[in-house]
Amino acid sequence: MSDLTRMSAAALAAALRGGDVSSVEVTRAHLDRIQAVDPQVHAFLHVDGDGALEQAAAADERRAGGEDGALLGVPIAVKDILVTRGMPTTCGSKILHGWVPPYDASVVTSLRAAGMPLLGKTNMDEFAMGSSTEHSAYGPTRNPWDLHRIPGGSGGGSSAAVTAFEAPLAIGTDTGGSIRQPGAVTGTVGVKPTYGGVSRYGLVALASSLDQAGPVARTVLDAALLHDVIAGHDLMDSTSIDVQWPSMAAAAQVSDVDGLRVGVVKELGGEGYQRGVRDRFDEAVRLLVGAGADVVEVSCPHFEYALAAYYLILPSEASSNLAKFDAMRYGLRVLPDDVAAPSAEQVMAATREAGLGDEVKRRIILGTFALSSGYYDAYYGQAQKVRTLISQDFAAAFEQVDVLMSPTAPTTAFKIGEKLDDPLAMYLNDIATIPANLAGVPGLSLPSGLADEDGLPTGVQILAPALEDARLYRVAAALEAMLHERWGGPLLDRAPELDAAA
Ligand code: GLN
């Protein structure tokens, strides 16, 4: 059998189904790979080798008993913002150091039910605030394409794990782009489902009206197979949508774009976007035209204000959601120096001072201000109105076209440290991904090639109307096939070998 870690999830599932390999063998191969390369990549905050192998053995038994789930026995990595029973969950923050959740997130319950061994928890920007994974309290993750560069964020750990062949699949979460932007800069597929499509129960909330968990994978079909496992109505999440989702995997195998109406978003491109990112985007559009798609330019005039609205709405919700980290209920508790009998408030202040990083504090302060009486209408209230205008832009656009397209991120992976001291420069990475979160529509980032100037991966974003997630997979699968032809195979085949001995 060829190197198990190089195989797609779909291929692994086929091999498991055919009895060519066991889940224990597949899981062990990935654990070995993690051991060999993760000291360089640092995609994982926690690896659960014993647990994963036990779950793999159970998956093998289920197969032996005649069961045949689509991903039964295929291992997976999970972003450390989803709670996992008995396994540490830190959200990349010191304040949750040592906390072991007593329950599973619904997404994790779905993975377990599907028989997917959990390899461990992946690194992330603290409480999912960031675009580079540099805001993790446990040190940055490195981009396997170039270890001096960022893997995107906040879910850089999940994307790097999949890129470095440490896991065939991973779960990410996307509040403003944290699945799609890491996908773009690592050359992997990342999907933000329709808001409410995947349960948020047990997903530690950053901004509840924006957060959405979704698949991280190396191929469109793999992402679709995983999407099918985690999507569905959940009574534990009041914003979960009660619909019967079509099979995303089936959509990913249609791959037909003849007659498809594609809108290129005028406001998401051009100035501020790196040359090579734009070139690869234009090339992807030309491929779609060649395959019979009708491409038009579409204007979404209010997208210009999306970033500003997002950086009021997100901090507002975050300031409220993060208030629960009060030193009483979870993880860290720091007693203030020089106080003989500290009050609860003093303990809370000392704990939050020591336990939260700069970016988190910055946003809590911003959000508290934006929600304060006297400023609420001027900031939070205005941002909510902009949000409505952005939804209306989407609605108008989707009357003309079936899908919208843009580059996923304005640049390829930047260097570690390059934007760390400049929050606004960091925020601009999500300029193209944020509108989808504000409107709740689904989005997929597909690797579109390598930029000529630096040889690093670029991504195209495909957006569809709410509930039309399957359409993303149909279009992305077609484009992926054409891009594989253009690049002579999957992009990741061109990634440099990591020195396993180092
Ligand atoms: N980078 C964006 C932010 O910092 C998006 C984060 C996310 O999607 N979790 O808020």
Image (spheres, rainbow, N blue to C red):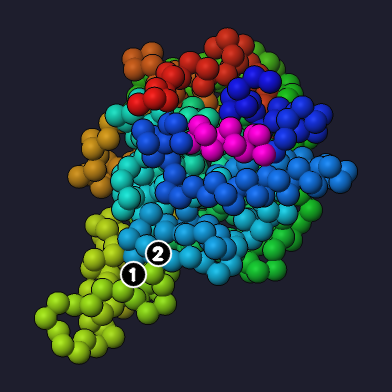
Per the image, the residue denoted by label 1 is 332
Mark before the other along the chain sequence, 1 or 2: 2
Return the mark for residue 98: 2
Residue at 58% across, 9% down: 488
* Residue stretch rendered in magenta on the structure: 24-34
Residue 468 on the magenta span = no
Q: Is residue 333 above or below residue 417?
A: below
Residue 291 appears in which quarter of the rendering?
A: top right
Q: Which is nearer the eye, 257 or 66?
A: 66
Locate the N terminus by quadrant. Answer: top right
Q: Amino acid at mark 2?
A: Gly
Q: Amino acid at mark 1?
A: Leu
Q: Around disc 2, counting alpha carbons within 10 Å, would you say few (fewer than 14), some (14 to 19), or many (20 or more)?
A: some
Asked if disc 1 and disc 2 are in contact, CB closer than 8 Å, the reply is yes
Residue at 28% across, 70% down: 352
Residue 33 on the magenta span = yes
For residue 261, side relative to residue 415 (left or right):
right
Q: Position of residue 257 (x, y in %)?
A: 71, 24
Q: Which is nearer the eye, 349 or 473?
A: 349
Magenta segment, prevailing SS (helix, strand or loop):
helix
